[in-house]
Image: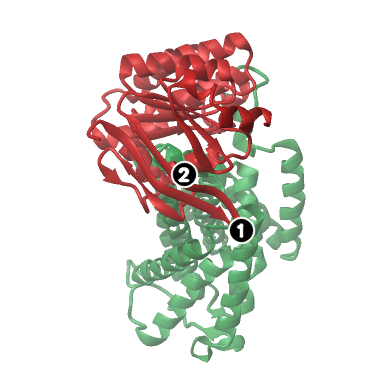
Chain colours: A red, B green
Amino acid sequence: MTDALLTVFGLGKRFGGFVALADIELEVKKGERLGLIGPNGSGKSTLVNCLCGTLRNDTGSVRFDGRTLDGLKAHERTRLGMARSFQLPRPFGTMTLAENLRIPLLYVVQLRKAVPNVDRRCVELLDLVGLADKADHLPADLTQIEMRKLELARAMAAEPSLLIADEAMAGLSNREVDEILALLMRMNEQQGVTIVMIEHIMRAVMHFSQRLVVLVAGRKIADGDPAEIVRQDDVVAAYLGS
Amino acid sequence: MRNPVFFLCLCVVAVATYGVAKFIDNAYVFFAGYVVLQYIVLSTGWNILGGYTGYVNFGTAAFFAAGAYSTVVWHKTVPDMPLPVMMLIGGAIAALLGLGTGYLTLRLRGTFFGIATLAMSVVMQTLITNWSFVGGSRGAYVVRPDATDWFGIDYIEYLFLLMLGLSVIAVGIARAIEQSRLGYGFATIRDDELAAEASGVPTLRLKLLATALSGGFMGMAGAPLPYYVTYLDPASGFSLSYAVNTIAMPLIGGTSSWLGPVIGAVLLGTLQQLATVTISSALSLLIVGVLLVVFVVAAPKGIIGWFAPRKGKPGAQP
């Protein structure tokens, strides 16, 4: 238990009469790469929103880095080291790319330590995702994959210990998927960031994840070694029908 | 330009403005100039909420009148209180009103926020109309001294100077915000509140700060009004033209920077004053309407949008 970064106990969320999530138990270890899969509408994004504080969970609780997060707002959780990227990129549209990255530097990193040269740090961060030459452009100029990279760069700018990447590759071509995968791998291996990846692209998930969790209809039905999980009968049934 | 240097430049401009007004040597210049300056403060205050955070406030009149009626109350209870103190109190009351409005309505976005602020203005007007201590629907008379103890200058000139000082402070603060951490925070609220929260921005706190600051400046702009008009009734204090002008001026000048509201207020305010003298005061709202239509078509980013350097490659969304 000592090396658990994120622990979820009995988490539940209802929208009116619809049970979106029920009794979710989850543990993510420090430095782990976890894949979270499930058919459409299985509650993956709801879980992410509950973890990040965008939605309030009805039951259960979330522990992160030795603290209970219940009742904390989204920005407070980000400041504790939990970052997310959005499924559909949500850049700050009137700001340049460099300014986009400036926000988490000003509102998260600078609360922990001094950032000597914010402008240079923005460009460095853009350089990590290969967007340094577009630092003064607006997000509207970017292609789809560049937008995803910006989204990841902004999440990483907050120097998180946990990154939740919500379908960072949906709609990208094979080569682009590889590019984002390599990026996430680098963040995990070089900077020691724990990553929870939510993804539909099975090739990416299988390649990336050390462990796989499967959600179906708001319940966790499997948790373990990826290669074994995908052969499990109920997982196959959930995806392909029995 | 660093903030203290900029502030000094503003002071120089203000002194020059006063010098020119004094040189023309016509009391009416101060009378008309006061209105233009009042609109600089109003539109700069409006822009802190409307331009920086993107919450369009239709309730300018409520904040403006809150400041004005607070002065009426002090004039009746503590008539010896100096006007600058009344302005500070009026500003504080309007800031509190802004904080309350913010807390109750900031879950609303876009049009809904606009409608809520408009409704608040109507509710406030009804309350004041039924409050006989401040004159109710009959209105309140405020006896204005002819001259001040201060070098014996004319009272209208004194009001002009007060508003000039307030404009300097308002514009100075607006610009300081724009280039600060706070300004970046406000801009994230305008762009995407969810992403702002995910990037560590405490959106609710910043929105409340914006409504309070914005309301406070509008209240301070309204506080000297009773002494300026000497007769204040709810219909004129809560006039729709305040709300319309205060929205039109930043839109015409440009909402993205401190300079926009100033340009808009000087341009539109001066035009309206000229029209009032030469043609008719009824024309001023027509001018606003026509200019607004022209600018929405010709300069959607306002006048400063013509000159601001485009970000990114040519043809990019500015």
**A30 and B107: which is toward the camera:** A30
Q: Report the number of numbered marks.
A: 2
The answer to whether A116 is drawn above or below residue B230 in the figure is above
- Quarter of the image where the C terminus of chain B is located: top right
Q: Looking at the picture, how far across and down is residue A106, in whole percent?
A: 35, 34
> Element at badge 2?
helix
Q: Looking at the picture, how far across and down is residue B119, in whole percent?
A: 63, 70
Name the chain letter of the residue that bears numbered label 1: A
The residue singled out by tag 2 in the image is B186
**B4 and B54: which is toward the camera:** B54
Which quarter of the picture shows residue B62? bottom right
Q: Amino acid at mark 2?
A: Phe
**Category of crowding for the residue at label 1, using alpha-carbon neighbours closer than 10 angstroms: few (below 14), some (14–19), many (at least 20):** few
> Element at badge 1?
loop
User: Taking A184 as reference, is B29 left or right?
Assistant: right
The residue singled out by tag 1 in the image is A17
The answer to whether B46 is drawn above or below residue A143 in the figure is below
Image point (31%, 32%), residue name = A109
Q: Looking at the picture, how far across and down is residue B26, in whole percent?
A: 54, 60
